[in-house]
Image: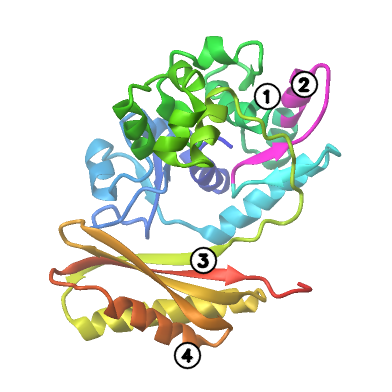
Amino acid sequence: MDSFLAAVEVRRRPELRGRPVVVGGDGDPTRPRQVVATASYEARAYGVRSGMPMQRALRKCPDAVFLPSDHPAYDAASAEVMNVLRGFGYPVEVWGWDEAFLGARLEVPDELARAVRSAVHDRTGLTCAVGIGDTKERAKMATSFAKAAAEHVYRLDSTNWMSTMGNRDVIELWGIGKRTAARLAAHGVHTVTDLALADSEDLAGWFGPTIGPHLRRLARGGGSRMITTEPWLARSKSRQVTYPSDLTDTAAIADQVAAMARELTAEVTADGRLVTHVGVTVRTKTFFTQIKIGKLPEPTTDPDIVEAGARRVLARFEITRPVRLLGVRLDLLTPAGR
């Protein structure tokens, strides 16, 4: 989907069409430590990007309209889009609010891609880009080219993969981030072609027997073709809070972690999930970030047990500086028969 969160906001406020729109936090860009969730293309023209502090976004684009995030509205809009996709009769694999794979074997897939774009726009008022590929990885990568294409449709397959991607930096591959790219560069692997031609045993030595060869497959266009239509179940659920003022009181820090643990437990157990592990994230004012995790005695839905586990994990930290961010993550198990 194109700039999905901002597009949903513009759909319900048509007077904002054509104006720079920034969505994030509570919508107040003057408050510290709020982050941009998404920006319309008009705002991006001023350099506003997802993940940017809202205060910086305000400096870059003071005339932008700043709006708070509204998760229920995005859930509803996403459901509309996915229902349109399912209406074509092909299996659909949903990836979050604004992205999905649709699996079809066609001689001329471009016609289906154009039909999808038209149907999504006609029935929801939202726009999207469609990437076509002979693997899921290539289809995903094709969407980035589709954004700039005249018809918002682009095709990447075995015939044009290397000619299109070969000279690009490995970080442009789906699934490779800055840290992995830096490690590859340290071994002289910079481009997609470099990685595609790299020795599998060398990669396994650098990254392990599973990840190393997988990186080489990504450079060659991947190989995933299976579409999974079952509802996706998260393996974990987490929450992070960046505080307007740094926390210094150890009891207050512990209470914040405990409250997050209890709130998350209530959410996941309502969905029939069991908690197996508790992780805690602590980020100090210097941005030094640590994550620790602990296993619970047994899978549970008891908030008291989860809270106690979170407090035990927190006690393993040596906190000597003010804390700007705390987070809690629960690893989950689905009971048999659910």
In terms of image quadrants, where is residue 73? bottom right
Residue type at tag 4: Asp
Earlier residue among tags 3 and 4:
3
Segment tinted magenta in the rendering: 98-116
- Residue 132's tag is 1
- Residue 109's tag is 2
Callout count: 4
As helix, strand or loop, the secondary structure at mark 4 comes to: helix
Q: Is residue 114 magenta?
A: yes
The Cα atoms of the two marked residues, 3 and 2, are separated by 37 Å
Earlier residue among tags 2 and 1:
2
Residue that numbered label 4 is attached to:
304
Residue 64 falls left or right of residue 145:
left
The Cα atoms of the two marked residues, 3 and 4, are separated by 17 Å
Earlier residue among tags 4 and 1:
1
As helix, strand or loop, the secondary structure at mark 3 comes to: strand
109 vs 12, nearest the viewer: 109
